Amino acid sequence: MEIYKEIETPASKEFVKLLNSQLSKNKIEEGKIVEGKVAKITEKFVFLFIEGLKSEPVLDINEIKNLKLYEDIKVGDKISVLLERIEDKNGEVVVSASKAQKIKGWYELEKAYEKNEPIMGKITSKCKGGVIVEHIETGSLMFCPGSQISDKPLKDISHLINEPQKFALIKLDKIRGNACVSRRQVISSSKKEDKAKIIEKYKVGDIIKNAVVKGYSSFGCFFDVNSELDVLVHLQEISYSRINHPDEIFNIGEKHDLLVISVDKEKLQVGCSIKQLSPDPFNHISNYELNKPYKVKVVKIMDFGAFCELEPGLSTLLHSSELSWSKKNPSAKKMFKVGDEINCVITEIDKEKRRVAISHRLTKENPFEIMEKKYPVGTEVEGTVNMISEYALYLKIDDVEIDAFLHCNDLTYGKDPEEELKKYKKGDKLKVKILEIKKDQQKIRAGLKQTKPDPFDWFKDKKINDTITVKVVSSDNKGLLVKPEGCSMDFLIKKSQIAINSADARPSRFVGSERIDAAIAELDMNKRKVSLSIKLLEELKNKEAVSKFSSPLSGKNLPFSSLSDELEKKKQKKEKK
């Protein structure tokens, strides 16, 4: 111990000099990765020798096992470790082989990222939003988002787990130590190289045989060519006829020949056309005439009608509104099937818009014209109730097979129309009169009450202020319900029209079955409107009596109590003169 008492002694100076030279030679620093030589292996620990350290570092055997080095390690082998502490509080050296491996792995990832090179890895497990990928060379763990696993949706990735494959580094966070990789980018880049070689095979003017319809969108149709290339046929290159969507012409899985019209080697795209494989049918559209029938072939059926061919390549639309005269919502699916040949009349030829319109119903006689000839307005005809709505009946005219509209107001003259409508059911046969035929609107109106005498005709020879005799049917607070003698209709005399004096205008004075006189206050034959008034008759009689100086009149149930007063006043005026 004497050598350490005096530092200034020659012996201690020499010791310090030797020690410093040795440390500077090995450059031992905390936070650096150093090589350690395996000196001893026990059941729990691995002892390392690192030159320049005063004691042997120790590694836990579990750490060696986690690094998958336990089976191959032996005394004398070298292991890279991170020197965390040269001396801890217990005077021991602290090292970590797993941290050293992670740091070395990060260096390798940085090199690959800077050089834009793919790395080898394997998917070890799934996690939220993607999968965990292990770098095969260093064991570093990286994240691969679900969208970057493949270039197409995958329901199951079990076949990819633990399989060595290439990944592209797309993001490195040096601060957090996170790495993000993509398998999709590697696949796409390799496909791009392959696609470039495939596209070199094609040139403008080539004809591709038996391309398969793969899918379509609003702007065109996609075809699969020999299972190696997808090509697009634009909407305008599908047909010479105008179409709104490819599904009007094609079905998935169909095979068609294509003409190559463009090759873009930069975008790796091949453009094709179908219509240019055949001559433009509109070049000889003058062979067809308007309003003439032609045989057409049904090639596709839609909800709104059917597409037909006048000749190969010259397709036309047969709209559902041109299918039938009598059916309200005709369906092409119920009337035809693909391949049927039907008669149609050309109704429009538009060379600028390259459109031809046809009609199937025009090949048959218009049933509304038949109706107009056979049963003109005013004719009585028998029909069967085909449908009932909340306010009308629809009658099928049997030998014409079209429906006539019968409104509830045309069922009866005097009763409640809606209540009368409830009496009828589907299948009832009725004899009706044709009231109106509109060919352009395809409407026929019929009436039931018009087949019977109109009780309102009883007032044809009557006029306003005429006196009629009525029979009281009933009375209530509203007034008197009366029936004119010889007429089958009932009318209401309002309470205010029973008498001049309000005291006498009491409906309760009448119990029913009384015969009384009333005057016609209002009469409109067109509107079928009549108003009756006892008060008006009283005023008319008073006026007549006063003008003649007559004695007070009397009448059954007619209160003329004020007549004598009027006569007395008139007599007094004459005496004064």
Image (spheres, rainbow, N blue to C red):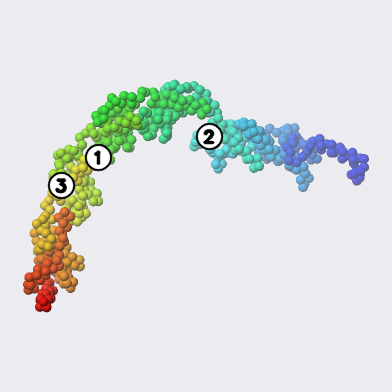
Q: How many numbered tags mark residues here?
A: 3
Amino acid carrying label 1: it is Lys
**What's the mark number on residue 327?**
1
Give the x, y percent position of residue 172.
Answer: 62, 38
Quadrant of the snapshot with the C terminus = bottom left
> What amino acid is found at the position of numbered circle 2 in the picture?
Ser
* Residue at image coords 79%, 37%: 27
Label 3: state its secondary structure.
Answer: strand
Amino acid bearing label 3: Val
Q: Position of residue 147 (x, y in %)?
A: 53, 38
- Earlier residue among tags 2 and 3: 2
Residue 547's x, y, as percent? 9, 70
Which type of secondary structure does the marked residue at label 1 adopt?
loop
Quadrant showing the N terminus: top right
Q: Is residue 481 left or right of residue 207?
A: left
Disc 2 element:
loop
- Kindly identify which numbered label has been placed on residue 54: none
Residue at (10% x, 62% y) in the render: 466
Task: Answer left or right for 527 relative to 267.
Answer: left
Q: Earlier in the sequence, mark 1 or mark 3?
A: 1
* Distance between the alpha carbons at the discs numbered 2 and 1: 54 Å
Q: Label for residue 432? A: 3
Say the numbered circle drawn on residue 150. Answer: 2
Residue under the image location 91 percent in, 43 percent down:
8
- Work out whether residue 551 or residue 7 is closer to the camera in this orientation and state it: 551
Residue 473 visible? The answer is: no
